[in-house]
Image: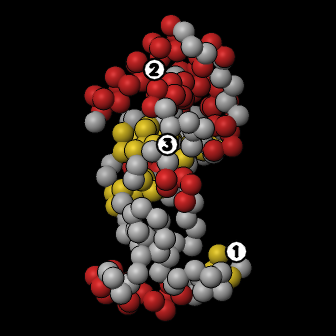
């Protein structure tokens, strides 16, 4: 599966990275290692290490998971048709559209929308990538590289702060402004494909 990390989301695009995804594509149930011998031969040398990983104070097996499963898999997010990805640490907003199938690490927070409407996604991406949003986020997010040189500034765009972004209702309500912002976001996305 395609994997998004914070470092791979830059300049409103994503560098392709991939991760082994030991799950059945449709059901997202753990793949049977007997049905997928190549998967088994890849994972087998790491079995001892993978079996004793601890999350939530318990090993994989103690948590009722197969030893080769991800310790955390948010199935509802993986099933989404698309989501918005942002880098956790960056100089400015880099919101991008992620299309299924995708995975993300903790350094690439995922914003899941309430609907699977592509126009809604482009509208929100347009808002997130606006100078208005950048100004607000730089005032509330932590600056990891603060100093005399502005080009060293790196802000932590934590999901909670992004979620608090005040969005003017005029940008979300049906109308010409929303249509133009959505069209601009879609055009930028199509050029970047």
Q: Which label lies toward us, 1 or 3?
A: 3
Rendered location of residue 190, percent (x, y): 30, 29
Q: Identify whether 1 is placed above or below 47.
A: above
Q: How is the image coloured?
A: secondary structure
**Which comes sooner in the sequence, label 1 or label 3?**
1
- Mark 1, secondary structure of its residue: loop
Q: Which mark is residue 56?
A: 1
Residue at horizontal 67%, vertical 37%? Answer: 163
Q: Are marks 3 and 2 in contact (CB under 8 Å)?
A: no
Rendered location of residue 7, percent (x, y): 43, 51
Rendered location of residue 152, percent (x, y): 51, 39
**Which comes sooner in the sequence, label 1 or label 2?**
1
- The Cα–Cα distance between marks 1 and 2, rounded to whole angstroms, is 41 Å
Crowding at dot 2, Cα within 10 Å, few <14 / some 14-19 / many 20+, comes out as: many
Residue at horizontal 39%, vertical 63%? Answer: 25
- The Cα–Cα distance between marks 1 and 3, rounded to whole angstroms, is 26 Å
- Residue 94 seen in the figure: no
Label 3: which residue?
83
Q: Identify whether 4 is placed above or below 162.
A: below
* Left or right: 71, with 15 as reference point: right
Quadrant of res 170? top right
- Mark 2, secondary structure of its residue: helix
**Which comes sooner in the sequence, label 3 or label 2?**
3
Q: Which mark is residue 182?
A: 2
Q: Are marks 1 and 3 in contact (CB under 8 Å)?
A: no
* Left or right: 180, with 148 as reference point: left
């Amino acid at each position: 599966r395609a994997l998004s990390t914070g470092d791979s989301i830059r300049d409103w695009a994503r560098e392709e990275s991939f991760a082994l995804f030991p799950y059945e594509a449709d059901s997202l149930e753990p793949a049977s290692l007997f049905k997928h011998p190549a998967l088994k031969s890849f994972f087998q040398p790491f079995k001892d290490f993978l079996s004793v990983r601890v999350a939530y104070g318990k090993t994989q097996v103690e948590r009722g998971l197969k030893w080769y499963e991800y310790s955390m898999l948010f199935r509802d997010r993986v099933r989404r048709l698309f989501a918005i990805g942002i880098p956790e640490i960056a100089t400015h907003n880099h919101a991008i559209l992620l299309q299924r199938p995708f995975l993300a690490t903790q350094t690439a927070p995922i914003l899941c929308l309430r609907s699977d409407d592509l126009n809604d996604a482009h509208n929100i991406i347009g808002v997130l990538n606006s100078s208005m949003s950048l100004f607000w986020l730089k005032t509330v997010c932590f600056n990891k590289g603060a100093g005399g040189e502005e080009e060293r500034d790196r802000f932590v765009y934590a999901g909670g702060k992004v979620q608090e972004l005040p969005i003017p209702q005029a940008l979300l309500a049906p109308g010409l402004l929303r249509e133009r912002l959505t069209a601009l976001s879609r055009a930028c996305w199509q050029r970047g494909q």
